[in-house]
Image (cartoon, helix red, strand yellow):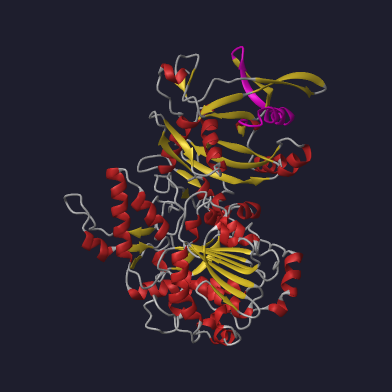
């Protein structure tokens, strides 16, 4: 893979900022300053070697090109203290005023008087700055006025963001601001320090639509990874394993132990506290919950960006409570199981919501614990023909071309997501390619390389139907086919176009000529006049509607698999092109796109598939692949209930 070229403007800024590089780095603040009250550290300085997962955060702060740091972390991970360390360093060595915001006035006053300033007084450079203050009235609970700058510790509200010019903004427990715009207003006060500003936001997970979570989404979204103490393989340190299954369908992640339940069905709490462990994805060894194991994982901690398209100046870190080497895992597992049980039995989600936000450091969404169809990544060679292959198809999801839309003033199709699959005679399905294309020519090149005929290509016509039909008419092709006429087989040239597929969220079936209800409509031919061999031709382009509910129900069951069922395998990242790798980041990874919808019910009890976020392109492509296989007669598309309602 080629290395992305650096932005010349960012290089120029970095070079101009060399003379302003922070003296000594912010970790120097830890060398001798006692942690102060409330940290249960007996007045000793903070030992960064006991929280190695914080080192990359401090390194990001010391980078002059980084201006916004967003920390989404579990409680009891000293994330607030880390933010205070960086703010303390800026006070001593940065340019411009500093404001530290807390959730309320009482909290701000308490933190200022009992902890923050008390800690700062132990920093030699801060103590030296205090000596420059000649007027004792310049030191109050809410502000310390130095000759060159002012430190303010304030409640997080819109009024306290007005009339200030700030070089450094710190918002602690930022989720409490909700969606009131306070964070944006505070950040807007740093415009006079474009090269020197530091914006530091820290919080547990919030809720969808909260300003803090929006700012985290604007970063590179670096996820915590650790190295297995047994096999030495790195992996994301996540709670659940459904996001990434092994080829045999099993998952890694935290496990409650083999003896977690009693015969009565209740949990054996002592067994859970004793036996909770983490199972390695690669070697399957159990990481038992011991201080030695937790220390090794902390020492190996590192971060991998899940959004490579973020601006270099915006960095984000996501780490859960279980990375803290002082906290046993068993209690976290027990709290999770109780919260989950409470929701299942009583329908009350609040304890589970708090667990995901505070312990797992995740943004709460109503579907966060909804069952997903997990993806199995295969180890087959896509360069070789699938054994016993009977058909291969390609599905294309259409997206807007932003540049063309801006130029024309109307929404214009031009970018695409695509998936290609093969099916064998037993019904097993293997992904041959997937990716993102900035033109039709790009995915057509993949189609040509995989030798997929036009009749087996389905293009989404849900939004730009007329444009998709025009595309199909423009790219029709002739193929020789053996056709039986008058009792004998003859070779005849036949014309094939792409198939236009339109998903329907209203229908669950259509009645066909044979009287049966199916989840795909009868063909609805669309006419376009084209030129072929110098003559005008009325070309018939096939269009089918398909039931979103029925087809995705079947897709979910296929992916979930199980003993005796057909296999549904997808490509590992090692098989992707460079362009696909760059695009598949954050919410756009294949695994995340395949988990962006969940099955639920409307108020009237009708089932449907709901989006938890809009990035469902691969999910729709895979559904269209099933439709294409079904149209070719290679699998039985699930018939919908034969009711009058199905006809409506």
Residue 386 appears in view: no
How many badges with numbers are in the image?
0
Q: Residue furthest left?
A: 263
Query: In the image, which residues are magenta?
Result: 461-487
Whether the magenta-drawn stretch holds residue 261 is answered as: no
Residue at the farthest top position: 486
Q: Is 24 located above or below residue 159 in the figure?
A: below
The image quadrant of residue 166 is bottom right
Residue 255: name its quadrant. bottom left
229, 146: nearer the viewer? 146
The relative height of residue 175 versus residue 119 in the rendered view (above or below) is: above
Q: Does residue 192 appear to the left or right of 605 in the view shown?
A: right
Residue 530 lies left or right of residue 315; in this view the side is right
Seen from the viewer's position, the closer of residues 90 and 277 is: 90
Q: Which percent across, then down, holds residue 271?
A: 22, 62
Q: Is residue 115 above or below residue 467?
A: below
Q: Nearer the viewer, residue 452 or 64?
A: 64
Q: Nearer the viewer, residue 422 or 552?
A: 552
**x and y percentages locating residue 212 in the rendered image:** 53, 57
Q: Residue at x 63, y 55 (%)?
A: 582
Question: Which quadrant of the view contains residue 96?
Answer: bottom right
Q: Position of residue 423 (x, y in %)?
A: 51, 38
Relative to 279, 72 lies left or right: right
Residue 471 colored in magenta in the image: yes
Residue 596 higher or lower than 94, as above or below = above
- Outermost right residue: 534
Residue 270 in picture, x, y percent from top left: 21, 63
Q: Quadrant of the N terminus?
A: bottom right
Q: Is residue 130 visible?
A: yes
Left or right, 284 with respect to 71, comes to: left
């Amino acid at each position: 893979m080629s290395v992305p070229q650096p932005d010349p403007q960012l290089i120029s800024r970095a070079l101009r900022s060399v003379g302003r590089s922070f003296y000594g780095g912010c970790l120097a603040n830890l060398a001798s300053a006692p942690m102060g009250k409330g940290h249960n550290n007996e007045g000793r300085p903070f030992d960064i070697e006991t929280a190695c997962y914080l080192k990359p955060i401090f390194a990001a702060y010391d980078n002059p090109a980084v201006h916004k740091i967003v920390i989404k972390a579990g409680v009891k991970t000293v994330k607030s203290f880390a933010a205070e360390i960086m703010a303390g360093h800026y006070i001593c060595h940065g340019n411009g005023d500093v404001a530290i915001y807390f959730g309320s006035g009482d909290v701000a006053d308490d933190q200022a008087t009992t902890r923050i300033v008390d800690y700062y007084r132990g920093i030699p450079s801060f103590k030296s700055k205090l000596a420059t203050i000649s007027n004792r009235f310049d030191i109050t609970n809410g502000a310390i006025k130095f000759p060159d700058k002012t430190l303010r510790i304030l409640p997080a509200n819109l009024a306290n963001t007005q009339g200030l010019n700030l070089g450094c903004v710190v918002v602690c427990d930022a989720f409490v601001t909700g969606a009131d715009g306070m964070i944006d207003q505070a950040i807007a006060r740093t415009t006079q320090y474009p090269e020197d500003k530091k914006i530091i936001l820290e919080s547990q997970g919030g809720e969808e639509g909260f300003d803090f979570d929006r700012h985290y989404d604007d970063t590179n979204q670096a996820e915590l990874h650790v190295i297995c103490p047994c096999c030495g393989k790195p992996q994301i340190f996540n709670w659940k394993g459904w996001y990434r299954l092994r080829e045999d369908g099993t998952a890694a992640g935290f496990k409650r132990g083999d003896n977690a339940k009693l015969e009565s069905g209740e949990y054996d709490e002592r067994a859970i506290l004793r036996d909770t462990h983490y199972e390695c994805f690669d070697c399957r060894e159990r990481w038992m919950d011991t201080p030695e194991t937790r220390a090794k994982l902390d020492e190996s901690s590192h971060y991998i960006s899940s959004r490579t398209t973020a601006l270099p100046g915006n960095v984000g870190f996501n780490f859960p409570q279980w990375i803290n080497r002082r906290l046993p895992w068993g209690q976290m597992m027990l709290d999770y199981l109780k919260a989950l049980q409470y929701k299942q039995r009583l329908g009350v989600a609040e304890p589970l919501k708090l667990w995901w936000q505070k312990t797992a450091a995740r943004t709460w969404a109503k579907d966060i614990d909804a069952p997903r169809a997990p993806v199995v990544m295969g180890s087959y060679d896509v360069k070789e023909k699938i054994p016993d292959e009977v058909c291969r198809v390609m599905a294309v999801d259409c997206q807007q071309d932003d540049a063309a839309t801006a130029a024309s003033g109307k929404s214009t199709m031009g970018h695409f997501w695509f998936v290609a699959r093969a099916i064998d005679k037993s019904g097993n399905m293997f992904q041959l390619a997937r990716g993102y294309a900035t033109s039709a020519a790009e995915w057509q090149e993949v189609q040509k390389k995989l030798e997929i005929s036009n009749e087996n290509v389905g293009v989404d016509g849900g939004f730009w139907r007329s444009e998709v039909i025009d595309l199909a008419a423009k790219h029709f092709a002739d193929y020789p086919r053996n056709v039986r006429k008058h009792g004998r087989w003859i070779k005849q040239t036949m014309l094939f176009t792409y198939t236009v597929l339109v998903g329907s969220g209203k229908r669950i079936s259509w009645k066909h000529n044979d009287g049966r209800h199916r989840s795909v409509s009868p063909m609805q031919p669309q006419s376009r006049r084209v030129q072929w061999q110098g003559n005008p031709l009325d070309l018939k382009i096939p269009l089918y509607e398909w039931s979103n509910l029925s087809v995705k129900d079947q897709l979910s069951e296929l992916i979930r698999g199980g003993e005796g069922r057909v296999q549904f395998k997808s490509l590992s990242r090692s098989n992707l092109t460079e362009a696909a790798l760059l695009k598949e980041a954050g919410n756009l990874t294949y695994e995340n796109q395949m988990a962006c919808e969940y099955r639920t019910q409307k108020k009237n009890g009708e089932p449907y598939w709901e989006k938890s976020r809009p990035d469902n392109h691969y999910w729709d492509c895979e559904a269209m692949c099933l439709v294409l296989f079904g149209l070719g007669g290679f699998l039985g598309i699930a018939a919908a209930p034969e009711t009058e309602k199905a006809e409506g």
